[in-house]
Image (cartoon, helix red, strand yellow):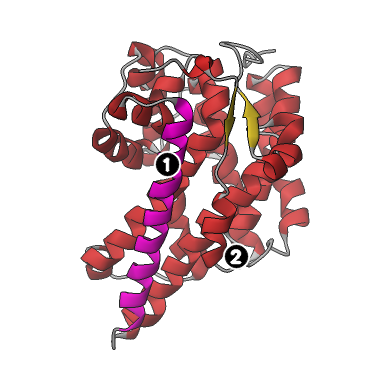
Amino acid sequence: MPSPLDQITFRLPKLDDTFAVFPDNGLNPDFSKIRVESREWINQYNDIVCGPKMRALMGNCNFELVNSYFYPYADGARLRATMYLTSILWLYDEFTDTVAGAEATYVEILVARALREPDFHDDTWISRMMKSGDFREKNEVLDISSYVAFRRETSAVRTCFDLVEYFAGLDLPQHVHEDPVYISGYNSAIDLVFWTNDLFSYNMEQAKGHGGANVVTVIMKSKGVDLQTAIDFLSGYCEALTSQLQESRRILAARDDPVYSKDAVRIIDAFGDWVRGNDQWSFATERYFGQENHIIKKTRIVKLKAPFSDSLALNE
């Protein structure tokens, strides 16, 4: 496989053109007010875990904004809940980036127990927060189909997709969740989010030595292609997934049962908010492209970072 560092720059596809088929429902009108409340809450834990530089970086990422794109119709209480969850997931992600596989596994168990066992409390910051990654360590690169299956189950997107029904005030019956057409739409949406996220985070992750757990690296290794060819393949795959999501909606909308034609379609449309909003937020924040985010959005040209450049420890 060609080394990605053989290339000095790479070109991002204009996925915003691909995702323009999904309506742009704008920002949640309660964003500014709820953002202040959410930031005050998560800062209790950021101050414990993160050093001043990392706290500044986390603040500039504006994670609360992503919820405003993802859930434009959520009321204030539901938007607050989604912001809290997203803040937990991002801090958890940053924390597990700094630990080895065994410790990361322990943290996973800790999180699960904190959520499932009302009386469990070990007095750690992560346990208190919840109460109110082996592949990377081994530098193992999966094939494409295995990685997709792995990413669907380990990505936080599945958890966040559950909130779509919550904010919409719907509880789809189990037979809808088991319907092959609905599953097709669900899977295409979740794949679009993580393929896009992997694309935008690739430069940062490969610089930290975490590039093996990224679909761009998976494509390069599986197909024996260079970085730009892998990115172009990803772009085409996103177009196919977008068509799959639209086809799922079309079939569900044509059914006589309103549970499918109205309620399930409402959720599929909300997945479209996620897909389009994820792309919009990725260039509205400094999370992936730093202070060059607006320039890169326009030019689509990204300079490849040298290994471990701009890598920031959690306690810095």
- What residue did someone put label 1 on? 234
Q: Residue at x 31, y 17 (%)?
A: 140
Label 1 packing within 10 angstroms: few (<14), some (14-19), many (20+): many
Q: CA distance from mark 1 to mark 2?
A: 31 Å
Q: Residue at x 77, y 55 (%)?
A: 33
Q: Given the image, on which type of amino acid does mark 2 rest?
A: Ala
Label 2 packing within 10 angstroms: few (<14), some (14-19), many (20+): many
Asked if residue 234 lies in the magenta stretch, the reply is yes
Residue 131 location in percent, x, y? 51, 37
As rendered, which of 190 and 315 lies closer to the eye? Answer: 190
Asked if residue 131 lies in the magenta stretch, the reply is no
Task: Specify whether 224 is left or right of 211.
Answer: left
Residue 162 location in percent, x, y? 42, 55
Note whether residue 123 is visible. no
Q: Quadrant of residue 23?
A: bottom right
As rendered, which of 311 and 46 lies closer to the eye? Answer: 311
Q: Residue at x 68, y 62 (%)?
A: 28
Extreme-bottom residue of the structure:
256
As rendered, which of 113 and 187 lies closer to the eye? Answer: 187
- Magenta residue span: 227-254
- What residue did someone put label 2 on? 74
Task: Specify whether 246 is left or right of 90.
Answer: left
Note whether residue 113 is visible. yes
Q: Quadrant of the N terminus?
A: top left
Q: Given the image, on which type of amino acid does mark 1 rest?
A: Leu
Q: Quadrant of residue 43?
A: top right
